[in-house]
Amino acid sequence: MSDPASGEPRGSFSFTQMLPTLLFDVAMPIILFNLLTRAGISTLWALAAGGLSPALNNLRIWVKSRRLEPLGIIVMTFLAVGTAVSLISGSVFLVLIKESFLTATFGLICLGSLFAARPLLFYIIRQFVAGDDPARIEWWNGLWQFPDFRAALRFVTAIWGGVYLVEALLRVGFALFLAPAQVVAISPVMAFAVLIALIAWTRRYMLALRERRLREQQQGQSA
């Protein structure tokens, strides 16, 4: 296995590799939920319908490559939990904080995965970096042998877990002290802002790691 800074397969990462995941696992459930609720469909059925998109995307990936993607599975799990909360609860407060259960669960999964063989963000980042390209998947998997790569992925996973636990607490605070209309307006904006900030920071952090490895390699060759 070559150095992580120099062993990346040809054909660099492009944004188009992210589109299927962003469309089916992130955007479509939100779009379907909003369209259906505005059309008068109940929250329960709107949540259930939103889960169809990531389910179909996971089926597509399974048929194509015989593997499942963690992000799609997590989204489906969150939607199932949200549906259950809507079904058993007639409380406005519980409906308003149902996203807190989802984000807190995701944060705990991230932190819990630090005790697994590989942390959750290893698989989520691989989905964006490698897509369905077998060569890039093999390259990414091979990077795990490098100690600095392992440490970086565990650090990134810990940050994601901590941030999502804080977001869950903020959502509960909003539901306690703000009007429902304000919570409904603020929560989606906060969710997107947190996600975009984490993706941007993670990309910058991993690129900095790559650049550091390149410099170390060049210095070693010139010594």
Image (tube, rainbow, N blue to C red):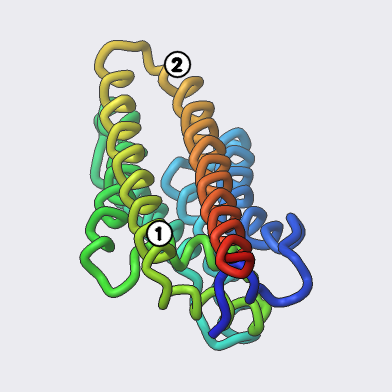
* Residue 120 falls in image quadrant: bottom left
Question: Toward the viewer: 92 or 6?
Answer: 6
> Pointers 2 and 1 in contact (CB under 8 A)?
no
Q: Position of residue 109 (x, y in %)?
A: 28, 57
Q: Position of residue 138 (x, y in %)?
A: 57, 83
State which mark lies toward you, 2 or 1: 1
Does residue 46 appear to the left or right of 154 in the view shown? Answer: right
Which residue is pictured at 35% across the width and 52% down the height?
A: 155
Crowding at label 2, few (<14), some or many (≥20) Cα neighbours within 10 Å? few
Vertical position of residue 211 compared to residue 37: above or below: below
Does residue 217 appear to the left or right of 145 in the view shown? Answer: right
Which residue is pictured at 34% across the width and 32% down the height?
A: 167
Which residue is pictured at 63% across the width and 65% down the height?
A: 222
Question: Toward the viewer: 70 or 144?
Answer: 144
Task: Name the amino acid type tagged 1.
Answer: Leu
Q: At numbered mark 2, what does the secondary structure look like: helix, strand or loop?
A: helix
Question: Toward the viewer: 19 or 137?
Answer: 137
Which residue is pictured at 51% across the width and 82% down the height?
A: 67
Dividing the image into 4 quarters, which one contains the C terminus?
A: bottom right
Q: Position of residue 101 (x, y in %)?
A: 28, 42
* Residue 119 falls in image quadrant: bottom left
The residue where tag 2 is placed is: 181
Vertical position of residue 38 compared to residue 76: above or below: above
Q: For residue 35, say whether it is visible.
A: yes
The residue where tag 1 is placed is: 153
